[in-house]
Image: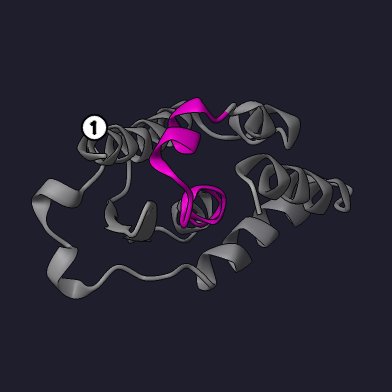
Amino acid sequence: MTIKEIQDEIVDEFSMFDDWMQRYEYIIELGKNLPLIKEEFKTEENIIKGCQSKVWLQGEQQGDLIAFTADSDAILTKGIIAILIRVFSNQKPADILEANMDFIDAIGLKEHLSPTRANGLVSMIKNIKMYALAFNSKN
């Protein structure tokens, strides 16, 4: 699936919920299915700066795609990074760099996060794009 197709799928899933409590519960549920980072990658350099809680992100190139794994010590944050990984893992670096992030506004995520969590979301996206930039320049 393309990044846009996955984003549209996520927007559709979120539209099924009537209120934000249900959406928060869904985000937490998504976090439980997160492809977890190996313990060896839970290092200081893999921590995303700017997040209120600890979030580790690891990206590795597999052929011409990037596969991401992550973890967090907070359940909501784990769900947020799980959404981003679902969108961007197993995609080409150039596609990640060109991806539009409107789906985040479409599901209302940013406006329903505390300012520090919203900053963390921006930092997570920035880190994913930095991996894409690094791997893209190798190709």
Q: Is residue 135 magenta?
A: no
Indicate the quadrant containing the C terminus: top left, top right, bottom left or bottom right: top left
The residue type indicated by label 1 comes to Ser
> Residue 110 appears in which quarter of the rendering?
top right
Q: Position of residue 75 (x, y in %)?
A: 47, 61
Q: What element does badge 1 sit on?
A: helix
Q: Is residue 43 above or below residue 101?
A: below
Q: Is residue 95 magenta?
A: yes
Q: Residue at x 36, y 70 (%)?
A: 36
Q: How many neighbours does mark 1 have within 10 angstroms: few (below 14), some (14-19), or many (20 or more)?
A: few
Q: Residue at x 21, y 39 (%)?
A: 138
Q: Residue at x 50, y 26 (%)?
A: 98
> Residue 117 appears in which quarter of the rendering?
top left
Q: Position of residue 26 (x, y in %)?
A: 69, 60
Task: Report the magenta residues as a range.
Answer: 82-99
Res 117 visible: no
Check disc 1 and report the residue beneath it: 137
Q: Is residue 42 above or below residue 13?
A: below
Q: Among all residues in the image, which is located at the extreme front?
A: 139
Indicate the quadrant containing the N terminus: top left, top right, bottom left or bottom right: bottom right
Q: Position of residue 30 (x, y in %)?
A: 59, 64
Q: Residue at x 32, y 48 (%)?
A: 53
Query: Predominant secondary structure in magenta?
Result: helix
